[in-house]
Image (cartoon, helix red, strand yellow):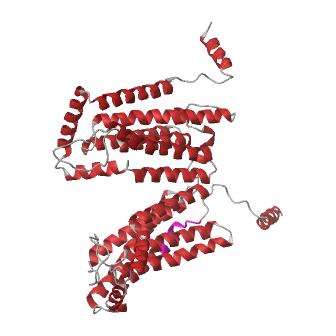
Amino acid sequence: MSKAAVLAHARKSLGGRPPRSLAPLAMVTAAALIFAVLLVLVRLRWPPLESADHDAAASSNRLIAGNHTLVTVVKAVTWLGSSGVLWTVIGAAALALALRKRWRLAVYLLVTGAGAVVMDPVLKSLVGRLRPVVAHPMAHGTGNSFPSGHSLGSIVCYGAVLLVFVPAARGRWRAVFITVIAALVALIGISRILLGVHYVSDVLGAWALGIAWLGITAFAFELSRRAAGQPVTDPVTEGLEPEARSDLRPARPERSPGQAHIGRVAAGVVVAWVLILGVVVGLGELVTRYGNGNVLGDRTIPHWLAAHRTPGLTRWSQVFSTLGGTQAILIAALATCVVFLAITRRWRPVIFVATLMVGEVGGFLAAAAVVRRPRPDVTHLDHHLPTSAYPSGHTAAACCLYAALAILVIGHARGWWRWLFLIPAIAMPVLVALSRMYRGEHHPTDILGSLLFSALWLTATYVLIKPNADGSRTPKRPGPARLRGVSALHRTRAG
C-alpha cells in the first residue's frame, strides 16, 4: 500500500481529520515523569543530587556577588515571575477575552493560573526542603524550597497566555512570540538560582510540573471542544481556539499615518513635555525662593490639618493616599488600557494613556529633583519618602489617570451614564490632594503645581494623540449631497 493510501485510510478512520502528532503527549508524559523522579529524590535527600545542588548554588552565588548592576538586573527579571505580576497578566488577559465574549478562554486562563497557586504551597509543605544557604545572600524567599514558585508560576501563566494567543500571531511573529515567552520563563528560573533562593532541582522540578499541568489543562479544554462538536487541533502549534484569531488580535488594522506624521506627533509630545516641565519647575523655584514661606497658606494649612487629626480621618487619608500611589495607579492604568483595547480594538487609547502616565512620572521626578523643596515642618504620617515635596506625584497621577478615563469614556460611549465619569475625575484628585496635605507630606502650592502640570499635560497629549479619533481603514462613503455635487460637475464638464 502506498504512503498516500495509508494517509487517506488514517484520515478516514479519524473521521476525516489528519492524524494527530504524538509529540505533545510524549512531552507532557516525560515532564510528569521527570517531576515525579525529582520529587522522590528530593524528598529522600539523595546524596548525589544534594551535592550537585549545593555546589551549583554556591558557584552561582559567587558568579554575581558584588556586582550591583548585575544583581539589580537579576532582581528585575525575577520580579516578572512574582505572584503580583503573574496575576496581573492573567487578570488583564482574562478581562480582555471576556470583553470579546471568549468566555471559555478566559476561564481557561483563570483555572490554569489558579492551579499553580494551589500546587506550589501544597508541594512545598509536603516536601519540606529548606532553602539554600549561600555565602552572599542577595534575596529572601519565604517558605520551603521545592518546587520554585516563581518558576512554576511563570511557566504556567506565560505558557497559558501563549496557548491562548498564539493563533493571533502569524509567520515570523509567531516564532518571535514563542521565543520571547520561552526566554522569559527560562530567565526567571535562572534568576532564582543566581539569587541563591532556589536549587537547580527546584527550578527543573517546577518547569516539569508546569509543563505537565499545561498539558492536562489543554487536554481538558480539548475535551470540552470535542463535546461541543467543535474541531480539535494541536494546541501547541495552532492554539486552543484557532477560529478565534480575529478576536485574539489586539487591534484592527488602521490607516497608516505615515512616518512623517508619526514623527511630528512624537516631536510635538516631547517639545510639549519639556515646555510644561519648564513652567512647573519655574513656578516651584518662585514659590520656594520668593514666597516668604506662606503662599496660599503653605505654613498655616499643614499645621492646622496636623492639629485636627483623628483616627478616623487618618484611616481615610491612608486609603486615598494608597489609591494615588504608584502601585494602584499602575494597576488602574493597565486595566484602562486593557478595557479600551478590547472594546475599541484600536491602539490610540492605549498610546494616549501610556504617554500620559509615563510623561507624568517623568515630569514629577524631574521637577522634584530640580526644586528639592523640603516637606512641611509637621509630623509626617509617611516615612522614608524618596522624593521632595514639590510637586505632589500622588495628585498629578490621580488627576491624569481619572481625567483620561473620563475623556475616553465620554468620547467612545453614547449613553447618558458616560457623564458620571466626571465625578471620579474631579473627586479623586481632590481627595488624594487633601489626604497628602493631611498626612503632612505637601504644601498647598505643591498641589497647585501638580494640578497645573496635569492640566497642561492632559491638554497637550489629547490634542496631539487624539485618542477618540477613528483610525479605521474603511473609507467614508460620500453622502447623497456629495454624490449629487459630483454628478452635476460631470454634467457641466460634458456640456
Q: Residue 288, percent across and down?
A: 28, 86
The vertical placement of 60 against 285, above or below, is: above
Residue sitting at the far top: 1
For the C terminus, give its image quadrant: bottom right
Magenta span dominant secondary structure? helix
- Find residue 481 and report its image quarter: bottom right
Q: Residue 37: say if magenta.
A: no
Q: Residue 160, percent across and down?
A: 49, 41
For the N terminus, give its image quadrant: top right
Q: Is residue 331 visible?
A: yes
**Which residue is more in the foreground, 414 or 457?**
414
The vertical placement of 427 against 341, above or below, is: below
**Which residue is more in the foreground, 99 or 457?**
99
- Find residue 365 and report its image quarter: bottom left
Q: Residue at x 62, y 31 (%)?
A: 232
| Residue 348 horizontal side relative to residue 437, left or right | right
Q: Residue at x 56, y 71 (%)?
A: 406
Which segment did they paint magenta?
458-468
The vertical placement of 441 against 45, above or below, is: below
